[in-house]
Image (cartoon, rainbow, N blue to C red):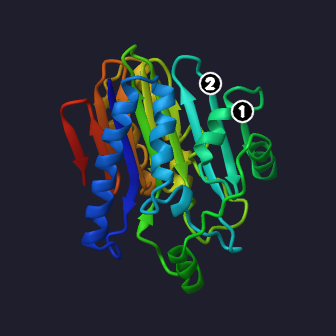
């Protein structure tokens, strides 16, 4: 059993050392909590649990830490994928939901598994998700000042359980001040993908990640016999022609953990029950 989570990128120009330490401590706390959960739950259940904890922490750009778009509203996206069933589910530009990843989890049980906008909101309400404003005072102040925030990217988790099953989940609050209707990579197979061989979750600039089909490329290459390291190196090399901004975490079927970023300010944490690691 192993688990790895990410909390997006630091903004080197504006993130204080205090904020960096707070994010690292939060990731370490959450990854250990999620590992304890993994001991008695499946990988699929655990990645939802871990991402929910990240969505509930305003240090991160997901859930209650989400960015405000150009029209003053918060729209979030999240997705979930099961390496066994190969089912992918997600919500795109959902509003006023505390935990978008939990709505994505419910969508695993229906035929139309990726919903956007009003459809995603209606589905959430019909299934007991009450209206919840994820706007916090700091985000409102940043929006009014049109300033950059300290919380970049998305959050995500990849886990392998005691049966060797892998799952991945990713959630984002957007990039902030974006055009209404913009779709990130987080609810696509470019940003969140898994099969029986490998699972990957991404953060960074969604447009760059989608252009490179990053997550699905890594998983496909591992499936075809590449090591995690080889798959990451080749895929990230393909980001270079347009200076693609991305970071990824992964676990393969052997329990190997790997991570890489194209602009090294991404923060990760992993735990295997004995050894803890916080990256950045």
Q: In this view, does 83 lie above or below 155?
A: above
In front of the other: 144 or 220? 144
Distance between mark 2 and mark 1 Cα atoms: 8 Å
The answer, for residue 121, to whether it is visible in the render is yes
Which residue sits at x=58%, y=43%?
A: 101
Can you say which quadrant of the picture contains the C terminus?
A: bottom left
- The location of residue 236, given as percent across then percent down, is 38, 43
**Tag 2 residue:** 87
- The location of residue 51, given as percent across then percent down, is 48, 44
In front of the other: 200 or 230? 200
Which residue sits at x=68%, y=49%?
A: 92
Can you say which quadrant of the picture contains the N terminus?
A: top left
Drawn side of residue 25 relative to residue 221, left or right: left
The answer, for residue 240, to whether it is visible in the render is no
**Is disc 1 placed on a helix, strand or loop?**
loop
Q: Quadrant of residue 140?
A: bottom right
- The location of residue 136, given as percent across then percent down, is 55, 71
**Tag 1 residue:** 113
Tell whether label 1 touches label 2 (CB within 8 Å).
yes
Q: Residue furthest top?
A: 163
In front of the other: 245 or 81? 81
Q: In this view, does 189 lie above or below 94?
A: above
**Is disc 2 placed on a helix, strand or loop?**
loop
- The location of residue 58, given as percent across then percent down, is 46, 62
Which residue sits at x=51%, y=29%?
A: 45
Which residue sits at x=36%, y=24%?
A: 39
Q: How crowded is mark 2: few (under 14 residues within 10 Å), some or many (20 or more)?
A: some
């Amino acid at each position: 059993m192993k688990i790895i989570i990410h909390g997006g990128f630091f903004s080197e120009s504006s993130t204080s050392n205090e904020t960096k330490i707070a994010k690292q401590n939060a990731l370490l706390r959450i990854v250990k909590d999620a590992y304890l959960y993994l001991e008695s739950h499946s990988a699929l259940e655990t990645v939802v649990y871990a991402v929910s904890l990240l969505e509930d922490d305003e240090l991160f750009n997901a859930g209650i830490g989400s960015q405000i778009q150009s029209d003053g509203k918060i729209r979030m996206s999240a997705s979930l994928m099961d390496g066994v069933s190969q089912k992918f589910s997600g919500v795109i530009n959902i509003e006023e939901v505390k935990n978008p990843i939990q709505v994505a989890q419910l969508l695993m049980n229906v035929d139309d598994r990726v919903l956007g906008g009003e459809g995603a909101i209606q589905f959430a309400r019909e299934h007991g998700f009450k209206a919840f404003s994820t706007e916090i005072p700091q985000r409102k102040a940043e929006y009014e000042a049109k300033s950059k925030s300290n919380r970049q990217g998305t959050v995500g988790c990849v886990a392998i359980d005691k049966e060797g099953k892998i799952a991945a989940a990713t959630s984002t609050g957007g990039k902030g001040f974006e055009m209404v209707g913009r779709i990130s990579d987080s609810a696509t197979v470019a940003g969140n993908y898994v099969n029986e061989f490998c699972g990957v979750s991404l953060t960074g600039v969604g447009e760059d990640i989608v252009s490179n089909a990053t997550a699905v490329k890594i998983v496909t290459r591992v499936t075809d016999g590449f090591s995690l390291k080889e798959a990451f190196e080749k895929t990230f090399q393909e980001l270079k022609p347009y200076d693609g901004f991305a970071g990824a975490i992964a676990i393969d079927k052997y329990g190997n953990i790997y991570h890489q970023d194209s602009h090294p300010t991404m923060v990760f944490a992993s735990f295997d029950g004995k050894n803890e690691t916080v990256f950045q």
